[in-house]
Amino acid sequence: MKKSVLLATLFLNLYVINAQETGYFYGGLESNSQWYQTDEGINFLAPEDQFRANNYLLLNYNLGKFTAGMQFESYLPSALLGYDPIFDNQNGVATYYVNYKDDNLDVTGGYFYEQFGSGLILRSWEDRQLGLNNAIKGLNVKFNATEDLTIKGVFGRQRVGFIESEGVIQAIDADLSLSGALDIETVDIQMGLSYVGRNQDTNGVEAIPSNVGAYGGRLDVVVANFYAGVEAIIKDPDVIANEGVIASNKLYDGTALQVNAGYAQKGLGINATFRRLENYSFFSDRLAEGNVFNQQVINFVPGLTKQQDYLLTNIYVYNPQPRLVIESFDQRAGEVGTQFDLFYSFKKGSLLGGKYGTKLATNFSYWGGLDAEYNLENRWYKAKFIGQGRQLFRDANLEVKKRISKDWSTVFTYQNVLIDKGIVEGGPLGETSILANIGVIEATKRFNDGKAARFVIQHLWSEDDRKNWAAAVVEYNFSTSLAIYAADNWNYEGVGQIHYYSVGGSYTKGNTRFAINYGRQRGGLICIGGVCRFVPENTGLSANLTVAF
């Protein structure tokens, strides 16, 4: 209540003081709700709170160089299944801020989002589908010291539900354009240096450090159509935790290394990335390590694999493994791997391009655990830089986009994927693997009056896990505003031969969109931008409303 009164007063004061100037409000409303129903077909028992909703109201006011805003959130009577229970039965002002910005200075007080470089050392952001909002409450200052040098400073505590983290984040970043500073025109060279620290009370335990810092440097170079970049980070020694309990008072440092290079021109794109992470989990609370809801995570460690678009290609997805675990039931020290992308467009009129041209995209990714020795008695380990660690994930896929006539366009996709079952189910790694081959054919028919129909058929072949699957989607767009669809994801060789069916539609008018669907949700990982969370199987009626203003 005090937050609401304070923010209302702030908005009013800004409006009255600057009444003669022109200011404006902007923001948005989003509501995601679901009515769960018991479904014996998938052994789902509806929770006591059958109707649940996640609601967000964002309101900002800008006046000249000043901007103020707040976000109201409601999770009543409980948050949707799969979200952190800390949101259940909560509502109120979740974030608020005041910002001043001119050509050289950008200062924010309150809650804010920030990123250093690629985010590997620091990123705070919001993703409502993942239930993730790790905004920092405190002070954020950005200063353009020169045309070529930008300095950022961060101080505050991370958001955890409707409260803040126990640990305090203090960080500084410098980004320098060497090309500009040295007056180099033929090559674009950017360099950055970062420090991110966490200060947290040790409750009198002298063996645990109160300050843990990460130190990073990055370099990016662009020459004509070629580009390359490298980022390296070292993290101070810290204890490791598992499920909210410190494993021991022994300290372990961490490292991260990421290298990427590529080439791009019209009709051709090549990109390759290498990344190695060793004990590289970083949270604003040391006990938050390993939590499945991504709460209090300081940095951004996405899965560097192709982001898939279809029902069956999203069953076996990769969740990054940067943690160090030295337990009798599981040992791991991090991950190392690579991803390669190739994009090519065959010209119109060529042999493979045909009348309308053809687009080809291929991707390969491989990720393995670090090759390491472990001593469980002394909680000691030693990892090789690459070695021959156990394979965690391998994905080879090919996508061909082909327009075959004025009205028909098609997409053909093939994927061969191998994944450790512990990643799929969230358990110990290295026990068994799942191999699957997936084929997808998509066709879209466009009509003269703006209508369109889309058809997708898919099949997954596997001798492992839940065996074979088949899926189909039919979608019809009456216009750019109104669409309906029906989909079925059938595990026809699995136990119970379950159908995960879904029907629904959406309507859009201006800045407002409403969508509704009924059906079953297949349980497992859902990943957005390479960041994942587990979703339990469920059945129910879902609705989504978004309004931007």
Image (cartoon, rainbow, N blue to C red):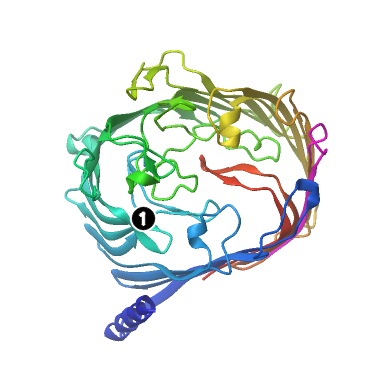
Residue depicted at 23% across the width and 32% down the height: 184
Q: Choose between 54 and 292: the one closer to the eye.
A: 292
Identify the amino acid type marked 1: Tyr
Residue under the image location 48 percent in, 34 percent down: 320
The quadrant of the image that shows the N terminus is bottom left
Instruction: Indicate whether 382 appears above or below 178.
Output: above
Residue drawn 53% across and 51% down?
Answer: 130
From the viewer's side, name the closer residue of 10 and 323: 323
Magenta region includes residue 498: yes
Answer with the quarter of the image where residue 397 lies: top right
Q: Is residue 446 visible?
A: no
Q: Residues within 10 Å of mark 1 (few under 14, many from 20)?
A: some
> Is residue 368 shown left or right of residue 123?
right
Left or right of 283 in this view: 445: right
Q: Quadrant of residue 195?
A: top left
| Whether residue 110 is situated above or below residue 192 in the rendered picture | below
Tell me the magenta residue range. 490-507
Residue 202 percent coordinates (x, y): 24, 47
The residue that mark 1 highlights is: 113
Numbered label tally? 1
- What residue is at 66 percent from the left and 60 percent from the top? 47
User: How far across and how far down the image is residue 150, in percent?
Assistant: 22, 47
Mark 1, secondary structure of its residue? loop
Reply yes or no: does residue 491 show up in magenta.
Answer: yes
Residue 199, given in percent of the width and then of the height, sits at 23, 48
Q: Specify whether residue 7 is in view.
A: yes
